[in-house]
Amino acid sequence: MITFKVLLFLSFMGFALNCKAQSNLAQLQKGEAKTILLPGKSSGATNPLSKYLRDVLDKSYENLGFQVEHYGYPMARSIVEANAGRLDGVLIRTDTVTNEYPNLLKVPYALAEFEIMLVTDPARCHPCDVENLDIVATVRGFKAFDYYLAKNPFAPHVTQVLNMKHLLEMLSSGRVNGIVLPYHKDVGIELNDRWATKVIDVYPSYHFVHKKHAKLIPILLEQFKMLEKEFKHPQASN
């Protein structure tokens, strides 16, 4: 449950971010903007993949004369803020997000590949396939799973939670028999040894910018290609 303090904090962050975005937009229109606002923990990356993505994105914008500032928003909230122009983009998302968020434009270079992973407790279900579960939980804003369900005939009831910690607690406590999460081995999600895992789909992920930055897309594309060689991708060591 979201507490009053959390709501108050998010409201304050939204107000501050909106003021910053309006200032940036005015500067962009004059060709003077020097700050790019992106989601992400301001304290820095917490796993190898996040570090790689932050390094590539921050260095790419730095090479173009921008300073990147990161704001810690939940997955679902960050894409709404980016589509509204209060953030300048989102770090990485599946390429179908533009179906719902038309103000976001893709930089056509996949920065990572994620798995849609089903995690179940075999003691509570058999068979433990997504089509056999009446209810599954996932993290709010996980659009790749929404699109996966849309193209398949089965439709379990989906409960959405705020973050990964709550999602894992849903399965641990037995409130659901299965959870679906975005998985990459270098993200560092710790799963219970007794749980079963199954990859149900794989999807590439891209950086998206707000349409006001459309002119940056071909330049960012070249930066990504160049910096992939400078910053070692975690998957390259597999």
Image (tube, rainbow, N blue to C red):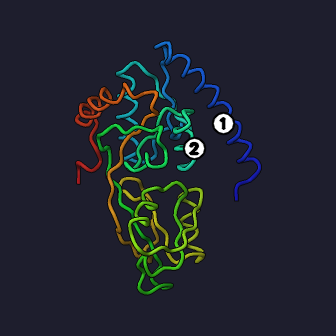
| Label 2 packing within 10 angstroms: few (<14), some (14-19), many (20+) | some
Q: Amino acid at mark 2?
A: Tyr
Marks 2 and 1 sit apart, C-alpha to C-alpha, by: 9 Å
Most extreme residue toward the right is 4
In the picture of the structure, the residue carrying the numbered disc 2 is: 73
Q: Is residue 3 above or below residue 61?
A: below
Instruction: Indicate the quadrant containing the N terminus: top left, top right, bottom left or bottom right.
Output: bottom right
Give percent across and percent down for residue 142. 48, 56
- Looking at the rendered structure, the secondary structure element under dot 1 is helix
Q: Is residue 39 left or right of residue 152?
A: right
Q: Is residue 149 left or right of residue 204?
A: right
Q: Can you tell which quarter of the image residue 66 is in?
A: top left
Give above or below for 201 relative to 74: below
The disc label shown at residue 60, or none: none
Q: Which mark is residue 13?
A: 1
Which numbered disc flags the more N-terminal residue, 2 or 1? 1
Residue 77 location (% of width, % of height): 58, 46
Image coordinates of residue 97 in percent, x first then y, are 44, 48
Q: Residue at x 74, y 43 (%)?
A: 8
Check the picture and name the quadrant holding the C terminus. Answer: bottom left
Residue type at mark 1? Met
Is the C-beta separation of discs 2 and 1 under 8 Å?
A: yes
Residue 22 point in image, percent of width and height: 60, 24
Taking the spot 25% from the left edge, 33% from the top edge, the residue there is: 230
- Other residues around mark 1 within 10 Å, as few (<14) / some (14–19) / many (≥20): some
Residues 88 and 54: in front is: 88
